[in-house]
Image: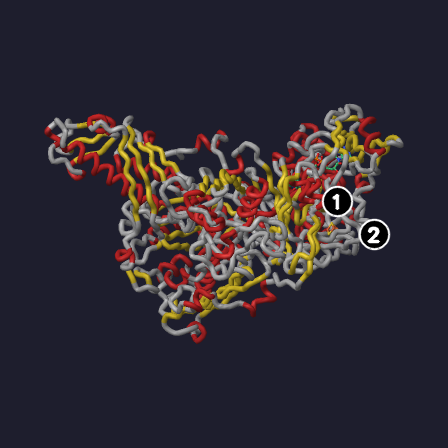
Amino acid sequence: MDRVDSRQKVTGAAKYSAEYELPNMAHGILVGSTIAKGSIKSIDTKRAENAPGVLAVLHYQNSPKVPGYAQEAHPTEPKPAGKPLQVFIDNQIHFNDQPIAIVVADTLERAVYAARLVKVQYNVDEHATDFDKNVPKAFLPTAAKRNPKHGLNDYTRGKEDAYKNEALKIESEYVIPTEFHNPMELQSIIAHWEAADKLTVYDKTQAVIGTQNAFAKDWKIPVENVKVIATFVGGAFGNGLHTWPHETAAIIAAKKVNRPVKLMLTREQMFTMVGYRPHAWQKVGMSATKDGKITAITHEAIGQTSTYEEFTESTLQQTRMMYTSPNVTTRYRILPLDVSTPIWMRGPGEATGAFALESAMDEMAYVLGIDPLEFRLINHTDKDPEKNLPWSTKYLKEAMQMGAEQIGWSKRQLKPGQVKNGEWLVGYGMGVGTFGANRGRAKVKATLHKDGTLVMQSATTDIGPGTGTAMVQIAAQNLGLPPEKIVFELGSSLYPPSPSQGGSATVATVGSAVHAVCQTLKQRIAGMVAGNADTSFKGATVENLTFKDGYVSVTASPSARLSFADVLKQQNLPELEVTEESSPDASLRSKYSMYSFSVHFAEVQVHPLTGQVRVTNMVACADAGTIINAKTAGNQMIGGAVGGLGMALTEGGVIDHRFGRYVTKDFAEYHVPVHADAPNISAAFVNKPDLINNPNGTKGIGEIAIIGVAPAIANAIFNATGKRIRELPITPDKLMMV
Amino acid sequence: MIPFQYVKPSKPKAAIDTVAKDQTAMFIAGGTNLVDLMKRGVMTPEKLVDINKLPLRKIERENGNVRIGALALNGAVAEDKLVMEKHPLLSQALNAGASAQLRNMATVGGNIMQRVRCPYFYDTAMPCNKREPGTGCGALQGFNRMHAIFGHSEKCIAVNPSDMNVALVALDAVVLVSGPKGDRKIPFAEFHRLPGDTPQIHTNLQQGELIMAVEIPENPYTKHVHYLKVRDRTSYAFALVSVAAALDMDGSTIKSARLAMGGVAHKPWRLNEAEQFLAGKTANEATFRQAAEIAMRGAKAFEHNKFKLQMGPNTIVQALKNAAGAV
Ligand SMILES: Cc1cc2nc3c(=O)[nH]c(=O)nc-3n(C[C@H](O)[C@H](O)[C@H](O)COP(=O)(O)OP(=O)(O)OC[C@H]3O[C@@H](n4cnc5c(N)ncnc54)[C@H](O)[C@@H]3O)c2cc1C
Ligand code: SF4
């Protein structure tokens, strides 16, 4: 089925947050600091204030106070240790391009102009932005220190660092640079105080309810007085999971000038103000027997964070559960630097961890002289070795088989540098990905109208995966109503609560609530028809009725048939409204380990003289439970593959440490892949339900779409050239062979 | 946006006079470079003289020369029949630049004049001698992966980012200029300059001088040509190193050669000695390798661009191989 909103999107009818026009709206522009650490000595705003059209220039000295700031309310869940950056609260500078003032003017152009006129002097302190130089400062996250059971603690299964004493082993270090989400849509907000204690925001966010709660706490106003609108979100990849300083800056400004204020970040500010995938160093030690059984893995990681918050991610999770190894050690540390706080970026943690683990798997396979696919099959595990629980479902082997056939794995030579296409060296590589098959709690309201159409509402968002489409399909299947008659409304805090759209959990979470609401609707319809004049309906229950094409009929005597519309008419009901909440069954979930799995295959060509790489084919296969919509699910896998390609070959932030300032902060310097980089990419799914996870049988797709892609490409490059590049991105300068 | 005046004259003389009289005035053509620089606050002209109404769009043949108007669009030139037939190297170089959308806005005059892409030049919070003389060269001890290996000075190590310019210098193009003091012709190799002590001066064009056209003299390089651009992604990225190679072949013997590099100097870098070496030699990898070594004499790299000392010669060899093999 096509996306329900594709027409709106391609015709421009879909409205994104910055596209709303409110009467009397003003425009805000943020001024960023030009030092990485220190304090503001003086801030001269006179010229800016006198510039034409300027309504206000706000900074720490004159900003209206945010009453709830003292509470340190933090909108991400779980809340990281530390204190989120609070705008305009003091003169302290924690990172370069930190927002230190907002200029508000009647037009965007005037705000931009005046923002240039703000002159700031600093007391400069020595900053630390260089990861390598500061590694000794890395520490165990506070969350782990506080709670010995926390997943970020050091982990040992069997003997600690057992690989060290083995004969057949590898030990390698891997580095990924900082990467930026850079969704097409820039982060933007319109803040509108409709009354002194009533706030409406049109906001680019993945978390409607989270944002609503955060702003209610910030401003000490009742939650219901905050309205959050995010009907369309132009991609986010995780950077809408947080409420950011710029959002509060706009709300402060709107309060001050008493007009709605629109604030859209510049592309350069997208690199400093809304999070990123943190720079990470990793080391993997692995040992195996001659016949390919892994005996031990040690995986260590250090991830970058800011000085004011402890950002953590589950970089090492998959190392504990992916392979049978009897001895596993993991150690995770974070390294605070004078930079802004990272935020989860597609495949958070796992994508970083998989680069190391899956590269190491490839390295180990070469040491053993075993085909890397074979090596993974030998170490496949039928139960979760970390939790010692059965999988709810796991069809990774099936996915591997599908992928290997499609990419033509059999053409691959174990020895690198053997296959050529003209001057180009050809190689094949693979990488496995996994991500928790998460599910949360969500509420959906459904209204069956007397014309037989169904409208559902929930405060989730659709950042691109096609959430609305999937929900319509789930309802269509469960209720027996054609999809054209169903509308799913989302992206408003006026709707029943749903969690933020992250962690690949939306279809499992909200889809389960849609399922529940449909079950209830069917029960209500069954109850209504049971008393129908047509006695064939007597004793009708959901079980002995058939719901199809907008009709309910008695399964045993199909001629007893009523349209949903007629059912309502007979009851004299203008509409039938039900609201259901669905949450996972904790006791059932504790008996199983639940993960989605993916496997990525890449075929690459490398030019030995110039180091140019072309990825010529990619195959992405997944065990993601039931596939609700093959098109949107395929989109996710293909988009993730392109994201992984960027991670492998082109993307990387660079800081000039003398200034603690990024030198890569536009699309000319920071290279996201373009169409010419993306080959033919095929996506395929095992498509077997996981009914333990949720009644629709789904597992998440968005994250596993990227997890494992980068190592697949890096491994393919090794297979082509014999060069093992352990620091991403793999640019041509790293690959010249002459 | 910083307020500025905007005029759109229809006669070249009016355009020239306006800019010649006013140090703060600049021409604007496609705007793909200048508008970006204005948005970042790097350039702050107080007056923009839009030249798009001037009759400078034609691509024509005159006495064997191909004459390309300054306002001809990059995309149009790349696809032009005459250019593809007579100077396919130029067509290849143009198509290797930017993206289709940009090529359909960008003009030949603007492309010749495009500024460096050094990140320090673009960030007004960073030091840069080119943008603000005397503040120091941010790149010298900083992130200089994209920077020059030839002709740089302590004051500036930026490279000319254009692809088109590399082909034009190889093809001995001439820039036709009209200015307040009359018309003049500037050989392409003398149009751009090395940074020396005055990196803020971008080219040898004087205030008020307008590029009217470029002229490419007739040459035998219609078959064995190749523009090879090595970059960080397959399209829409500036060159790490690029090479324009043109050969006139007699069987396997090179009668004459033209060779230039991009991404290595403050100007498109013509490789005269390597060309002379190639003349009369047999086309094979060993010859190409020797030529590449000659070409690389005097190269000096910095902390992050040492790879260019290897990528440079390799790309020359590969471009020559491709040119020799091309028919
Ligand atoms: C994202 C991006 C990627 C790019 N990638 C590449 C690339 O890979 N390779 C490449 O070669 N280029 C690339 N470019 C640069 C592009 O080629 C130039 O921006 C373009 O050629 C400039 O032409 P324009 O007509 O738009 O110039 P404008 O922006 O209008 O002007 C540029 C300068 O030229 C001056 N000028 C214009 N016309 C004349 C004239 N007739 N006489 C005198 N002065 C004049 C202006 O005063 C101004 O200083 C890229 C640009 C962008 C934005
Ligand atoms: S290389 Fe040139 S443009 Fe770059 S910082 Fe130095 S002076 Fe400025």
**Image point (62%, 41%), residue name:** A104
Name the secondary structure under disc 1.
loop
Q: How many discs mark residues in the rendered view? A: 2
Q: Which residue is farthest bottom?
A: A165
Q: Nearer the viewer, residue A608 or A179?
A: A179
x then y, percent, for residue A206: 45, 45
Q: Nearer the viewer, residue B35 or B105?
A: B35
Q: Quadrant of residue B95?
A: top right
State the residue position of label 2.
B197
x then y, percent, for residue A168: 44, 71
x then y, percent, for residue A683: 41, 44
Disc 1 residue type (three-letter): Pro
x then y, percent, for residue A251: 54, 44
Q: Which residue is farthest front?
A: A196
* Same chain? Circles 2 and 1: yes
Q: Quadrant of residue B167?
A: top right
Quarter of the picture containing the N terminus of chain A is top left
Residue A404 got which mark? none
The chain under label 1 reads B
In the image, residue A326 above or below residue A484: below
Q: Nearer the viewer, residue A55 or B232?
A: A55
Callout 2 touching callout 1 (CB < 8 Å):
no
Q: Quadrant of residue B203?
A: top right
The chain under label 2 reads B
**Image point (80%, 50%), residue name:** B133
Q: Tell me the mark number nearer the camera, choosing from 2 and 1.
A: 2
Distance from the alpha carbon under mark 2 to that under mark 1: 19 Å
**Image point (67%, 28%), residue name:** B81
